[in-house]
Image: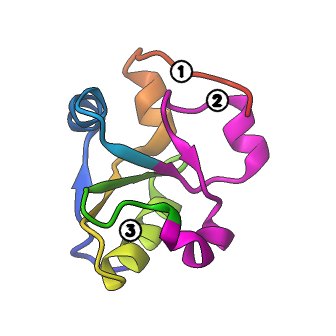
Amino acid sequence: MSSQTPEVDVDRLAAAMDAGAQLVDVRERGEYAQVHVPGARLIPMGQLAARLDELDRSAPVYVICATGNRSKAMTDLLRAQGFDASSVAGGTQAWLSSGRAADSGL
C-alpha cells in the first residue's frame, strides 16, 4: 500500500455518486449483503484483479471496504493497471456514520 494512495472523504464520494461515478466495494459477499453504499458494485478483493474488464477505464473508480484498509490496497492495484482510482477514507463505516442512506442484500 502506497503512502501516496489517493483518498476521498464520504462527502466527495456522495457528490461523485450523484454524478454517476463507479464505486467498487471490495469486501466479501456477506459483508456487502449486510450493508453497503447504494450503487456500489461488489467485486471482492480476491476477485478484483481477474475482473478489471468489468470496470470503465475512462471514468474514475472509487474503492470502498469496511474502514479503508482493503480499499487502499485495491486502489493501488487499480492505479498500477492504469485506472484513475481513489480509496474512500473510513470506508462503509464512515458512510454510515455520516447518516447517509445504505442498502442491504445482494
Q: Please name the amino acid that badge 2 sits on.
A: Val
Q: Which residues are the magenta region?
A: 24-53
Crowding around mark 2 (Cα neighbors within 10 Å: few <14, some 14 to 19, many 20+) is some
Give the image location of residue 40, x and y in percent.
50, 39
Q: Give the position of the N terminus as an image quadrant.
A: bottom left
> Is 44 contained in the magenta span?
yes
Gap in Å between the C-alphas at discs 1 and 3?
A: 22 Å
Give the image location of residue 91, x and y in percent.
45, 44
At numbered mark 1, what does the secondary structure look like: helix, strand or loop? loop
Crowding around mark 1 (Cα neighbors within 10 Å: few <14, some 14 to 19, many 20+) is some
Residue at coordinates 49% horizontally, 48% vertically from top-left? Answer: 67
Q: How is the image coloured?
A: rainbow
At numbered mark 2, what does the secondary structure look like: helix, strand or loop? loop
Residue corresponding to mark 2: 35
Gap in Å between the C-alphas at discs 1 and 2?
A: 6 Å
**Marked residue nearer the N-terminal end (1 or 2):** 2
Residue at coordinates 74% horizontally, 28% vertically from top-left? Answer: 105
CB within 8 Å, label 1 to label 2: yes
**Marked residue nearer the N-terminal end (2 or 3):** 2
Q: Please name the amino acid that badge 1 sits on.
A: Ala
Closer to us: 16 or 54:
54
Q: Please name the amino acid that badge 3 sits on.
A: Thr
Residue corresponding to mark 3: 75
At numbered mark 3, what does the secondary structure look like: helix, strand or loop? helix
Closer to us: 104 or 72:
104
